[in-house]
Amino acid sequence: MIGSLTRRELRVVRRWLPELKLVSGMALGAIFAFCLFAPLSDDACARPHKDKPQATKQEPPRLQQKPAENSEPRIPQQSFSAEARLLEVYRLIGDGKGGNALQKAEQLVRDVPNFQLAQLVYGDLLLSRTKVLPTMGNAPASIAATSQARLEQLREEARRRLSALTEKPPAGALPAQFIAVPPTTKHAIAVDASRSRLYLFENGPNGLQLVADHYASIGRLGSDKSFEGDQRTPLGVYYITSRLDASQLTDFYGAGALPLNYPNEYDRRLGRTGRGIWLHGVPSDSYARSPNSTDGCVALANPELQTILNRVQPRTTPVVIAKSLQWIPPSKAEPERRNLQNLIEGWRVARASGDVTRLMSFYSPQFVSSGKDVNQWRQLLQRDINQLRGHSLQLKDLAILGWRDKSDVLVVTFGEVSDGQRTGALKRQYWGKEGGLWKIFYEGVIG
């Protein structure tokens, strides 16, 4: 169940072990065999579908069978709160209520039979009726000997899920990357790769509020993606580009998928390669994947992904993926927010003034956009300024997201609307620090 835990966590769990009674070894063997040998989905994340061409050699596509007329996608009817129920079992164990823990674990595996970690917890609870367990996930030797790697994966999954109980974000705090999010952006997502945790935020009258968090699987070799095929999940600031329903995909993706705009312009500037990074579900014969098991995507249990699919909007929903999220109170971020909003306002005023020389002072000498260098961009800006003919320019729905790794980066998105117009182009800029000053190194229209 919870092998490889900290001493504090083991002390919490071990209190109940001697209390329970004898159980059939044959039943235990069946439970552990299911946990360790049940069909897994720990292979390549980027499985083909009809709209996702493969540039490199892949295994043959999993062909999608044509569904019967009026049929629904094959997504199991699993409890959305399965993880919460598992954590409740942990709580009961910690409180010394072994009998209640066993009852709830048994009901959980009946309701969600493909939740392999829950099956392992149930097996441990039954086995503890015969002896005190030296470690958790204590499968019979004949089974464990042939599946040690899978057993370790389940133990690590248990540890990371349990950390969701003991390492909650500070109340009211937000990831530092969310500098300014406009009211029109209804949701935002942050992924903490080190904790295998995805956080969903809802934007309301009081700003972003954390409304849900879910266990998530990332790349087989961890995070910090650099090149295609490295089996790592990228780190950075991204946006959801589209929504793919289960009917458009093979069963491998479960409830559906939310593709991200990896590589973004900062990734390209650093020479990072790859494609097809999605948030997606798991096959219908699984409940979850082990913490490090994808080719770079972020995978969630189908019931939890479905709640996200039902809420978020493509193009406007940001997704931050960090090795470890830094949480700060909104009040602490306010000075930086004001300074950066003033910076963007300075760019807007220069753009509307018609002074192209003043405007170009905001751009990096290394600026590149759609094959145009900074000199070609100046010519394009001069043409746009001439077309404005003195009309003022407004920026609507300004979003500012920050990122820091090899350098400081801002991802700025806004609607550019001139006087007399109701709508305008949706634009995105990437700013980097050069000599201590913010400069734009990319600008483009979001199609």
Image (spheres, rainbow, N blue to C red):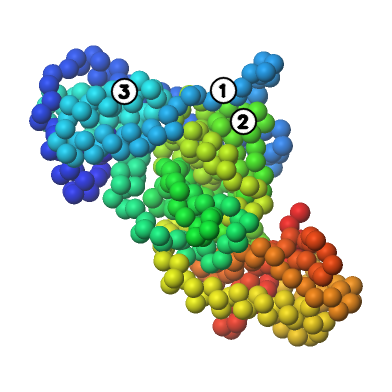
Which residue type carries mark 1?
Arg
First-in-chain label (2 vs 3): 3
| Label 1 element class | loop
Query: Disc 1 to disc 3, how far (Cα)?
Result: 23 Å
Disc 2, SS: helix
Q: Can you give x and y, in whole percent of width and height, for residue 437 in the image?
A: 60, 82
Q: In this view, does 209 lie to the left or right of 160?
A: right
Q: Which residue does the image show at 18% across and 49% down from the upper left?
A: 8
The Cα–Cα distance between marks 2 and 3, rounded to whole angstroms, is 28 Å
Amino acid on which the number 2 mark rests in the picture: Ala
Foreground residue among 368 and 381: 381
Q: Which quadrant: the N terminus? A: top left
Question: On the image, numbered disc 2 is attached to which residue?
Answer: 246
Q: In which quarter of the image is the C terminus?
A: bottom right
Q: How many labels does the image show?
A: 3
Query: Quick one: SS at disc 3?
Result: helix
Q: In which quarter of the image is residue 341?
A: bottom right
Label 1, on which residue? 74
Residue at 20% from the left image edge and 28% from the top image edge: 100
